[in-house]
């Protein structure tokens, strides 16, 4: 008060510039390409190793993190499968799933279709029902607990035989596992979709939805095989479609969803840098693309991080971001009612992702 009365003395404190409180709103998205085992953060790997008395081949977090330098898909898969050793009990699978849902909710994810790799656990001596029930027990209440509706996708390892995949699918059907779809992942080159024709026919007969990784490291022709021989509704990754203009035209005309994972593509060197990523060209071509995190603990980020880094690399407009979010919702296997709810949520507010 003295300052104002006297008019000459310096103010005792600097005026504080008050930033207007703009409420930020996360863009509601569906995450359609996510491997639950790829959400195992280094801290959780060490915590589970300790709980289960497993000796890890790394002295600590730093040494583990130093291994997250990948040269291609296989170099990542080697570490990804090795780290699964810490997943032993239903509780371990449940804890991993809860950690993902908590982080995904903070990223704006409102619906998640979550792949798991049962064969990667069975081959280590973990019973099928341990891994399935551990994840499924958490997904059962994900909407109440995290605001995220979910679907479990059983993904099959394409570098193993079709017989192995069929045996596991039989096991899943026999235990009435709460899966809604099947997928195809692991080492792509040399393991074309055509290898799994009978698996997909059987899954379709069982009423499951169908998706497959294709065109990540493998050629555009694998995308064509996945569509024509497996009859998939959705393609995971699919970036190599850009090598084949006729295929792009077909994918655009049929509105085939491509679940693109930009940070994954950079970390596995499918593209040199994020600035070289084909996402803007894919959007411009009219492809039905969405943004997903793939294996967020390994590739440097969740869906929100993918959006943030895309924004830094490209001039993505609010319109583009809203389109990517709308594509993710439309491309999901959620009920029409849930899709309408999420689209309403998306259309009702300002985009600030
Ligand atoms: N590609 C293929 N297989 C995988 C991936 C991937 O990005 N992540 C986990 N399994
Ligand atoms: Zn993937």
Image: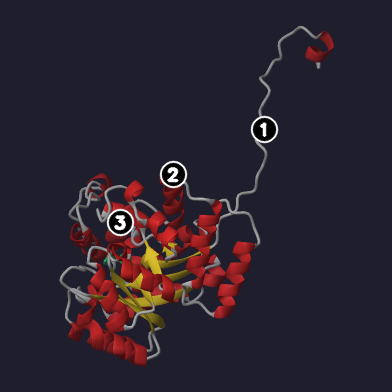
Q: How is the image coloured?
A: secondary structure
Q: Secondary structure at mark 2?
A: helix
User: Can the viewer see residue 118?
Assistant: no
Is the residue marked by circle 2 packed among few (<14), some (14-19), or many (20+) residues within 10 Å?
Answer: few
Tell which circle, 2 or 3, labels the residue nearer the N-terminal end.
3
The residue drawn where x is 35% and y is 62% is 294
Q: Is residue 21 left or right of residue 258?
A: right
In the image shown, does 263 or 257 lie closer to the viewer? 257
Q: CA distance from mark 3 to mark 1?
A: 40 Å
Quadrant of the rendering where the N terminus is positioned: top right
The residue drawn where x is 30% and y is 58% is 45
In the image shown, does 90 or 138 lie closer to the viewer? 138
Relative to 199, residue 215 above or below: above
In the image shown, does 152 or 232 lie closer to the viewer? 232
Q: Quadrant of residue 36?
A: bottom left
Disc 3: which residue: 265
Disc 2: which residue: 312
Image quarter where ligand 1 lies: bottom left
Disc 1: which residue: 18
Relative image position of residue 162 (x, y in whole percent): 19, 83
Q: Is residue 14 left or right of residue 332?
A: right
Q: Secondary structure at mark 1?
A: loop
Q: Quadrant of residue 248?
A: bottom left
Tell which circle, 2 or 1, labels the residue nearer the N-terminal end.
1
Q: Is residue 302 left or right of residue 14?
A: left
Relative image position of residue 146 (x, y in whole percent): 53, 65
Relative to 244, residue 319 above or below: above
């Amino acid at each position: 008060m003295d300052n104002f009365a006297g008019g000459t003395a310096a103010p005792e404190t600097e005026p504080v510039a008050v930033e207007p409180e703009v409420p930020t709103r996360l863009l509601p998205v569906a995450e359609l390409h996510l491997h639950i085992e790829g959400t195992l953060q280094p801290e959780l790997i060490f915590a589970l190793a300790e709980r289960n008395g497993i000796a890890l081949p790394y002295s600590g977090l730093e040494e583990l993190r130093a291994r997250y330098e990948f040269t291609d898909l296989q170099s990542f898969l080697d570490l990804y499968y090795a780290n699964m050793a810490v997943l032993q009990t239903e509780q371990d699978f449940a804890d991993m799933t809860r950690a993902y849902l908590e982080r995904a909710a903070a990223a704006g994810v409102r619906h998640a279709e979550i792949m798991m790799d049962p064969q990667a656990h069975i081959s280590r001596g973990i019973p099928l029902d341990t891994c399935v029930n551990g994840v499924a027990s958490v997904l059962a209440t994900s909407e109440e607990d995290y605001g995220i509706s979910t679907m479990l996708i059983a993904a099959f390892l394409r570098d193993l035989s079709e017989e192995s995949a069929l045996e596991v699918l039989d096991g899943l059907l026999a235990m009435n596992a709460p899966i809604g779809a099947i997928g195809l992942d692991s080492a792509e080159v040399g393991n074309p979709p055509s290898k799994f024709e009978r698996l997909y026919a059987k899954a379709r007969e069982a009423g499951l939805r169908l998706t497959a990784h294709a065109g990540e490291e493998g050629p555009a022709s694998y995308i064509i095989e996945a569509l024509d021989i497996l009859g998939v509704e959705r393609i995971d990754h699919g970036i190599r479609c850009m090598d084949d203009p006729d295929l792009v035209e077909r994918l655009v005309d049929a509105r085939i969803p491509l679940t693109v994972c930009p940070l994954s593509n950079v970390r596995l060197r499918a593209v040199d840098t994020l600035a070289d990523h084909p996402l803007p060209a894919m959007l411009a071509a009219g492809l039905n693309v969405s943004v997903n995190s793939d294996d967020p603990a390994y590739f440097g980020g969740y869906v929100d991080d993918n959006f943030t880094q895309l924004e830094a690399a490209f001039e993505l407009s609010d319109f583009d971001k809203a389109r990517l979010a709308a594509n993710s919702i439309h491309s999901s296997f959620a009920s029409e009612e849930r899709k309408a709810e999420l689209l309403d949520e998306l259309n009702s507010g300002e985009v600030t992702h």
